[in-house]
Image: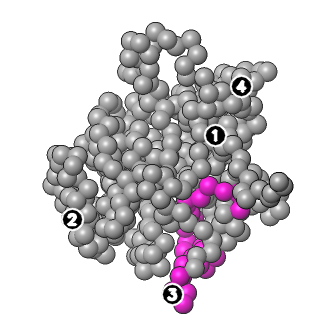
Amino acid sequence: MEYSQYKKLRQTYGFEEIAIVPGDITINPDQTDVSLVIERLNFPIPILASAMDGVVDVRFAIAMSKLGGLAVLNLEGLQTRYADPEGVLDEIANEPPEKVTQVLQRIYSEPIKDNLIGDRIKAIKDAGGVCAVSLTPANTKRMSPLAAEAGMDILVVQSTVTTARHMSKSYRGLIFSELVKQLPVPVIVGNCVSYSACRKLMETGIHGVLVGVGPGAACTTREVIGVGVPQAAATMDCAAARDDYFRASGRYIPIVTDGGIRNGGDLCKAFACGADGVMLGSIFAQTEEAPGRGNHWGMATPHEALPRGTRIRVAVNGSLEQTLFGPTSVTNGTQNLVGALRTSMGVCGARNVREMHQAEIVIAPSIKTEGKGFQYTQGLAK
């Protein structure tokens, strides 16, 4: 009996299932250019810290900026709900796993205080840091003018899934084409995972796109609502949208792979898949400068009705500078990330990030296990 196919499935891949093929020429790692440009802002390293309360506070943002990267402060998190958040951070760190979700829900029920928005931004700016802040679409229209007045440098509008067109009961929702005209700073929007959603977001005039739904170490979105695309495939699809949009418009809009990066190898693969930058959470939560006391949780974890995350214990294994530039004290690839990227670019013959986009990638599900029996039996491969 003949029948029509109901849906067509395609194979997609995550970073653990692919590998980068070395190039035909090599260059010295110290001759590579790894910088990231977002509108008029140039960052020496293409690495962003996630807008999560266990990762970024004022102190961390200042330190990250001085090292050449960019940390994004969550303007709807603990830093704007509590004048002194240290006590609640201690409480979150000390709660047993079976109680932490309820504790987070209670802690995050404290209202956001508008005066703290300006205080946090000014503290970063007064220390000479570049200040990026994150808002959800629901609060952007009200809170972004306050952040702009306080001196923010970049606005990140972020939710689990963000599209250029959103259907709601409100007469006029958030319209990105109007937002970018109203604000004097670049606007980055996320998150998305498909060619079409990425392309439509770029057509609104925004200045960057975050790629990734559900791959974060503390995120349970994929388990709770079943949505997401493995990060290697999502990055490549959005990179295709970026390149097609660039050819059509002449505007190059960087994409940032957000989540799913466990080590330097994954980070390098993200760039080979087409990323212009990466956003990291759990790796930075392990640094001495992070406010989470060795714990990490996502922005959706305290949701009052449908929490899509969990607090995870990541421990503290070094400083922020060590994580970015070494020297490394661990063998799992979570330190000297910039050195790993430069080395990978060097063996691929890529002088800059856009040349790294041309590196060949192969499907390689055995890339981590081939020949590594002793590492696994001795517990060295994490």
Magenta stretch? 168-196
The image quadrant where one finds the C terminus is top left
Which residue is labeled 2 in the image?
Answer: 106
Among numbered discs 1 and 2, the one appearing first in the sequence: 1
Q: Nearer the viewer, residue 108 or 132?
A: 108
Horizontally, residue 79 falls left or right of residue 146, namely left
Label 2 amino acid? Arg
Which residue is labeled 3 in the image?
Answer: 170
Residue 369 pos. (x, y %):
54, 19
Among numbered discs 1 and 4, the one appearing first in the sequence: 1
Horizontally, residue 304 falls left or right of residue 360, namely left
Instruction: Evaluate whether residue 366 shows in this view.
Output: yes
Task: Specify few, some or many for label 3: CA neighbours under 10 Å numbering under 14, 14-19, or 20 or more.
Answer: few
Residue 222 pos. (x, y %):
48, 52
Which residue is labeled 4 in the image?
Answer: 21
Q: Residue at x 29, y 35 (%)?
A: 315
The vertical placement of 83 against 176, above or below, is above
Label 3 amino acid? Ser
The image quadrant where one finds the N terminus is bottom right
Horizontally, residue 157 falls left or right of residue 2, namely left
| Distance from the alpha carbon under mark 1 to that under mark 4 | 16 Å
Label 4 amino acid? Val
Q: Which residue is at the far top? A: 374
Residue 336 pos. (x, y %):
47, 28
**Numbered label tally:** 4
| Distance from the alpha carbon under mark 3 to that under mark 4 | 50 Å
> What kind of element bears circle 1?
loop
Q: Residue at x 44, y 30 (%)?
A: 334
